Amino acid sequence: MAALGGCGPVVAALLRRGPAPGLRPVPRRYLYKKKWAATAPRIPCTRLALHHFDVNYSLQLKDLWPSVRASLLCEQKYGALLNNFSADDYVTQELELMNATDFVSEGSRKAQQGAAAEEVRREESRPQEVPGKVRTVMQTETQAEMSPPLRASISSNIKCYTYPRGDITRFRPARQDSLGILDYYLMDAASLLPVLALNVQRGDLVLDLCAAPGGKTLALLQTGLCGHLAANDVSISRTKRLYSILNSYIPKNIRETVSVTSYDGRDWKQLEGGTFHKVLVDVPCTTDRHAVMEEENNIFHKRRTKERQMLPMLQLQLLMAGILATKPGGKVVYSTCSLSSLQNECVVERAVDIAETQFNISVHVEDLSHFRMLFQDTFSFFSDCRLGELVLPHLTANFGPMYFCKLHRV
Ligand SMILES: C[S@@+](CC[C@H](N)C(=O)[O-])C[C@H]1O[C@@H](n2cnc3c(N)ncnc32)[C@H](O)[C@@H]1O
């Protein structure tokens, strides 16, 4: 009866069974009422999402949750990914005049300074010919080797401008150059971190397993280093958006080096197993920011409950396919835009375990803690991630959430 929402019992019975013999037909206004009553009391998906997050993330993030929650509910910040293929060279100047800075080159500068400092430390701790001192020297050297891998290069070809912490200025929309190519792409700047972590080297064969709508594909192309880029996404409609981004940002001769497919990524291992040097697995997830802000296409819709509950399984299958698509010695970056440890660390742990036990493939999780140090001025990182790194939305740096974890297929 509750489902009929307040209709009297007789009317409700009539609506269910049709008019009993001898009774007048049900007036139209009651029929209308049935339709109205069945849809009226729906709780907005955004509220369901927020309730779900309140229950789970207050346990996971503890004292940090209220601040992350407030940030999720506020306007997010964007970064402007510069299009290296655009002929307009005034953009950098224009952005710098607006007080925006390229966070990638800042991180890269810090990495170089860190590497130089590490070199000095190593030099100073070289064994000296003093009998009895050898042990101390060896200990110091080991400590230097264990320090964060600051040498890890940050792809300098990618440039992404952001406004300083606390500055919520908006970027103007992208503009076309004389050849019709757009000058920058506005995106959550934290989405670049998985691409930077992949650290594409010249000539690498790269697979972007869940590529649409294509922000990270575009960033991978900005490196100018991919030998070949395979961009795949199961969704035909989203793949169309990927094509549209490629058409708007990438000149034709470069576009031809990208192969776009619409396979179910879980089947990739049967198609091209062990082929790629670098694989990006940017999986579908609860998209936490979207889930608390937008009703449309919300994963917390009642009719998507099963799909939502099955997400960690789908994520695991996609990550496994990514690992199997990688050459021995190659790297995989797994990423989500969710805070959920069930969709993040737990998926990675399970994949490492399955690779070992079912496929006899050894996979190591790489330390990315240097990202925290290099990019702390731009992003707010969670310091308690068991594996990988997590960018937490913060009112002064409202990017993310973005989880990323790098795996090395031995
Ligand atoms: C987080 S989005 C990817 C965003 C994209 N990497 C970017 O930066 O613009 C996840 C994508 O996974 C795709 N997807 C979902 N299931 C998939 C599957 N089984 N195989 C391949 N792609 C899948 C979705 O269509 C969606 O476009």
Image (tube, helix red, strand yellow):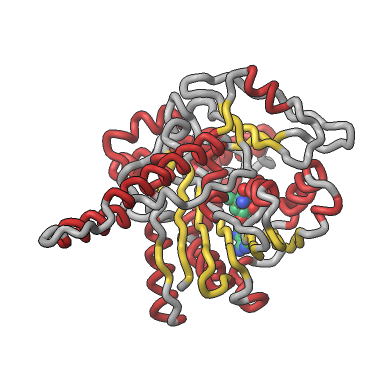
Q: Is residue 133 above or below residue 176?
A: below
Q: Residue furthest left?
A: 132
How many numbered badges does the structure rendering display? 0
Which residue appears at 80% of the width and 53% of the height?
254
- Percent of width and height locating residue 230: 70, 62
Could you tell me if residue 160 is visible in this image?
yes
Nearer the observer, 22 or 9:
9
Res 41 visible: no
Q: Residue at x 62, y 66 (%)?
A: 265
Q: Quadrant of residue 39?
A: top right
- Residue 345, quarter of picture: bottom left
Please name whichever residue, 133 or 178, is drawn nearer the observer in this view of the structure.
133
Q: Nearer the viewer, residue 283 or 11?
A: 283
The residue that appears at 74% across and 52% down in the rendered structure is 237
Q: Position of residue 142 (x, y in %)?
A: 26, 59
Q: Quadrant of ligand 1?
A: bottom right
Say above or below: 367 vs 95.
below
Instruction: List the single residue furthest toward the right.
Output: 179
Residue 270, compared with residue 24, is above or below; it is below
